[in-house]
Amino acid sequence: MGEHGQDRAPEGSLARCLATAPRPDRPEAAADRVADWVAGLTGDHGLGPLLAEPGVPPLLAAVADHSPYLWRLVRTDPARLARILGGPPAETLDACLRGMAADCAAAATPAAAAAPLRHAKAEVALLVALADLGGVWDVDAVVAALTRFADGAVSAALDVLLREAVAAGRLGPGRGAEGCGLAVLAMGKGGAGELNYSSDIDLVVFYDPDAPRLMAGAVPSSFYVRLTKGLVKLLGERTGDGYVLRVDLRLRPDPGSTGVAVSLPAAFTYYEALGQNWERAAYIKARPVAGDLALGRRVLDELAPFVWRRYFDYAAIADIHAMKRQIHAVRGHAAVAVAGHDLKVGRGGIREIEFFVQTQQLIFGGRRPELRGPRTLDMLAALAGDGWIDAAAAEDLAGAYRLLRRLEHRLQMVDDEQTQRLPTDADGLRRIGLFAGFADRAGFETALVAALSTVEAHYARLFEHAPGLDAAAGSLVFSGDAIDPGTVETLRRMGFARAAEAVETVRGWHFGRRPAVRGPRAREVLTDLVPDLLAAFSRSGDPDAALTGFDAALSRMPAATELFSILRSNAALRQLYADMLGVAPRLAATVASRPHLLDAAIDPALQREAAPAEVAARIADAPGTTEEVLDRARDIAREESFLIGLGLLSGAIAPRRAGERYADLAGAVLRGLLARVERDFADDHGRVPGGTLAVVALGKLGSREMTAASDLDLMVIYDADPAGPESDGPRPLAASRYYIRLTQRLIAALTAATRRGPLYAVDMRLRPSGTQGPVATQFRGFVHYQAGDAETWERMALTRARVVAGDAGLGQRVAAAVHDSLMRPRGDALGPAIAALRVLVARGKPAAGPWDLKLAAGGQLDVEFLAQFVVLRHAAAHPALIGLPTTAVFEAARALRLLSPGDAAALAEASTLFGDVLQRVRLAVDGPFDPTLAGEGLRRRIAGASGLPDFATLAAQLGETRAAVRAISDRLLGGAG
């Protein structure tokens, strides 16, 4: 007789029901290990008759050989093994769960509940594994048992925490969890009742901030977040008894920005406005498992319209196709394989079967309630029964699903690891095949490849009309609940230096963290666009800068569907925009607000240079209020500036020509606004009889050397009799007051930040007497001032003076006065005076560094001062120098032998080099340029625009050029600088 008077295990016990066992890789060694363990057993454990059952020794030998985790559970508690083998498995499971619940209910603190929860986990793990390996339970029974334990453990653990909260006075008393205000939903496989052997559990925790049991003074968010963290700790913390369950809370709304428990109002607002199709798919499997179950059911009822749309949801198909592109072609392997294959997310894997089912549930489930079930196998049958797939497809996929889930469990039983990846070596594959019940590696691989290929074939047919994706690109998955490590690695290979940040940025778009992507249509188009957009960024020369620029653009845009659609439809435009983001953010910002401007890149008709007269007329004659006209001026200026920048970026426009076009545009805008301001001003104040006004451009506008970031240096001159009559309008003004007020209106029109933003910055410090003088200067006073009182710096400014707007007659007189002033002979004191002025500038506004090309010693300012010196020193004898741009001054000085050929050539080359580089820099960077912060793409573009092979060569060339300019300046100006 065996122990307890029995010589056989009880009828119906697991020991009597065992039908099979995996074959050990080393049968003799495994048998010896079991025998040694049995020989060392002591005490009244009740294992004798159970070990005598024919199915038990081979099963234990398989466990000893294949699974260190299970063998440890066998050896450490013989009484537990006896309970498992000695009873019917279903009854053993029930008894275990009842005992766990009772022990937790008796626990006074969460710490006291930790041990019974973990002991129950170990018992269920061993019970399920032996019933599975022994052929007693099929896959359905295994996943159901695992899910029942998870449900029970979560509920028991939460109940302990709730009782603690009641005892602490944070929650009012009640019947169990009823009315507690917290609802725990199981998602994914847990929600569907399909948990795998070592699965994490996906939970979403919601709370009602107005829960009736919440005590006065308690802050709902803090209380429920703390409660949820306590639940995660109680289940997931590893103690000497192991852990219970790993908890994943990332399926909640926007997990990067929300607490671990989410209030119901916030959740409902999120899903209504920002919910994504992958989240709809996730809620197919959602199920209340703990806390206030009635509240959980109400949550799902409220979310039903979000998940199940009443129409056939073909609008979501494009987004689903994009999800497929991100998940299917790039996860696992480019082709079905065995070694190292991921049974979950690899080709032909479990995820594809689930996605196959859930896709059709999303599309058709709104009108077909029978297609709303959570279990994959049930829904395969329902899809076949409803005629959406044929019976053969359902049977094929169901068979593959069961096989893959069985293999998944075997992988996880080895060491209780959450893994679905097969071994990469032949020995490991042979062993896992034996553990899964196959006779040899060849049979295992044949069966697996057949299953994977079958799934892949059915999956591909489901999406046969979907756009393709280069499988070699790598993993690019963003529409999910967590950062995918494969995606991070792919982005690194694509050239993203901050790959993890890039993934989080793109995920933020999917969660609607930017205003432009909060509409469902925008996110659907974006999902499809993202892989191609990232590829374009990777080719831009600075992927990180391009991505950062795009994200910044989205943060400023109220909507982006038009831009996304344009970028998705044209690869050339996509690449051009990526280049702009990396090396010309000014242009990219314009595109963000006016996506249609990209059409100019492919439509020659839109690339034509608008005549200045046309631009001025479009502004002056624009209908609407003053505000609308100012907006119109900004639209026109920005669009025309964009075309100039586009030409500069593409190389179609030389830097010098770009400077001329920027200046011509500014002049045209100024003329248009002046005409409109004068007209509006006259409505209030009339006009001064006989009075006229002219606007004089100085600086880079005057010399037509502007960049995309140049200010407008202006001087306003009027001519009217100071003793004459006032203006003839309803509110008359004296002439001086009239033109000062009119000038102020003009400046405001140029500088005010309207809805379209600012237009130009205006600098009037070069007017007579600088900031001490009136903003509008009387003509006779201007002539008198220039004849006697003007300082050297003011005479230098006049060398670039050009009348750009206002009365033509007055403009001719001003130009003649400027010409006469510049024609006055200058003595030898001019050079030292200019040198001294340069010293003052350096002291008052020192250069930010060697890349401050304007203010650095020997930089652009020195070149301009030298050009102005040449004009002032020699215009009396050579009036042709007047009105020339900087480089042309040196070229003329060489021809006239006013400078040595070497100096003239060096200065002309410096002027061109500095101008070319600054045109590129100002197109790309707001503020100072720091090459250490600039991306490689921008550095390469700047060097290329200067005709140099690389940025290092450019830096060296600039250094040599500045030194040469400084030496020439010291020589020509007398060394005072």
Image (cartoon, rainbow, N blue to C red):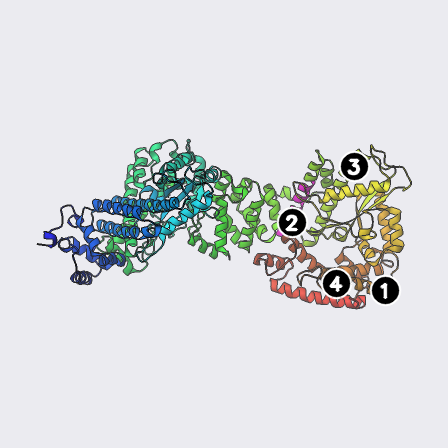
Tell whether 681 sits left or right of 524. right
Mark 2 and mark 4 lie on one chain; the one further toward the N terminus is: 2
Q: Is residue 560 magenta?
A: no
Q: Horizontal and vertical percent for residue 8?
A: 11, 51
Secondary structure mainly formed by the magenta segment: helix
**SS under mark 2:** helix
Q: Quick one: 43 or 687, which is closer to the camera?
A: 43
How much space separates mark 2 and mark 4, taking CA atoms?
A: 34 Å
Q: Which residue is mark 1?
A: 829
Question: Do labels 3 and 2 touch, CB within 8 Å?
Answer: no
**SS under mark 1:** loop
Mark closer to the observer (1, 4): 4
- Looking at the image, can residue 782 be seen? yes
Badge 3 amino acid: Phe
How much space separates mark 3 and mark 2, taking CA atoms?
A: 34 Å
Query: Which class describes the residues within 10 Å of circle 2: few (<14), some (14-19), or many (20+)?
Result: many
Mark closer to the observer (1, 3): 3
How much space separates mark 1 and mark 3, taking CA atoms?
A: 46 Å
Q: Residue at x 83, y 52 (%)?
A: 769
Question: Do labels 1 and 3 touch, CB within 8 Å?
Answer: no
How much space separates mark 4 and mark 3, taking CA atoms?
A: 42 Å
The stretch in magenta equals: 633-650
